Amino acid sequence: MQVTLTAFLSLDGVMQGPGGPAEDPSGGFTRGGWMVPYADEAMERFASEWFTAADAFLLGRTTYEIMAAYWPQVIDDDEVARKLNTLPKHVASTTLSTLTWNNSTLIRGDVAEEVRKLKGEPGRELQVHGSGKLAQTLMQHALIDEYRLWIHPLVLGRGKRLFPDRQPPLALKLIETKTTGTGVTIHVYQPAPKPEPGTSAPASNDHSDPARLYSQRHTT
């Protein structure tokens, strides 16, 4: 299976509490629910299309608890609810001891090693939704095969971010872009080779060098 990550983000990279004020108020975060005004039919359609490819889910503790409190109450003729309520859910947590949501299993021990084992199993997608700390661990070990980042047109100014300060350099290749009617842009990326630094300094006095011209125009 390939590991895919879906994350709702603000323009400044915040992913905390998109669905409601009480979803994740940790750290004194009071701006939860910021995603809700941007939800529309296109967003629902795109999400449903991706959920059809899921054969299992991989979730962090906070995201699991949020989902487990909501989705079992949704009728199963909803495609997203049917997938979430029936498929295997692997939960990375050092604090949970029991899981009550149907078909849920705790990941114990080395998360990266357990995820490598899951990737070796047959199937299409092992989907990660939200789960910021888990996602960061997976990035550190190069275990994410596809990033689906839903960028919302607002700046929150604070909150947990997917790519925190001191994040190691990460290069991605854009393979698809979608846009909803409310201005949410969905960028789909796959890993690219490690980024290498460059320079805009010309190798000669060639004034036609495009990198030099761009640098001059935008730094003066």
Image: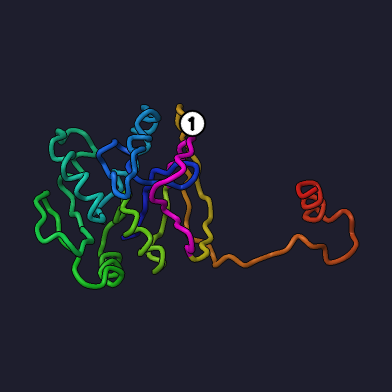
Magenta span of residues? 149-167
Image height of 112 relative to 185, above or below: below
Q: Provide residue 127's location: percent of width, then percent of height.
A: 30, 53
For residue 164: magenta? yes
Q: Residue furthest front?
A: 28
Q: Provide residue 185's location: percent of width, then percent of height.
A: 48, 38
149 with respect to 91 (left or right): right
Assign the magenta stretch its main secondary structure: loop
The three-letter code of the residue at mark 1 reads Gly
66 with respect to 190 (left or right): left
Q: Nearer the viewer, residue 34 or 192?
A: 34
Q: Provide residue 75's location: percent of width, then percent of height.
A: 14, 33
Image height of 14 relative to 39, above or below: below
**The N terminus: image quadrant:** bottom left
Residue occupying image coordinates x 25% and y 52%:
55
Q: Nearer the viewer, residue 14 or 202?
A: 14
What residue sits right under mark 1 in the picture? 183
For residue 203: magenta? no
Q: Provide residue 162's location: percent of width, then percent of height.
A: 41, 53
State which quadrant residue 180 falls in.
Answer: top left
Residue occupying image coordinates x 38% and y 46%:
15
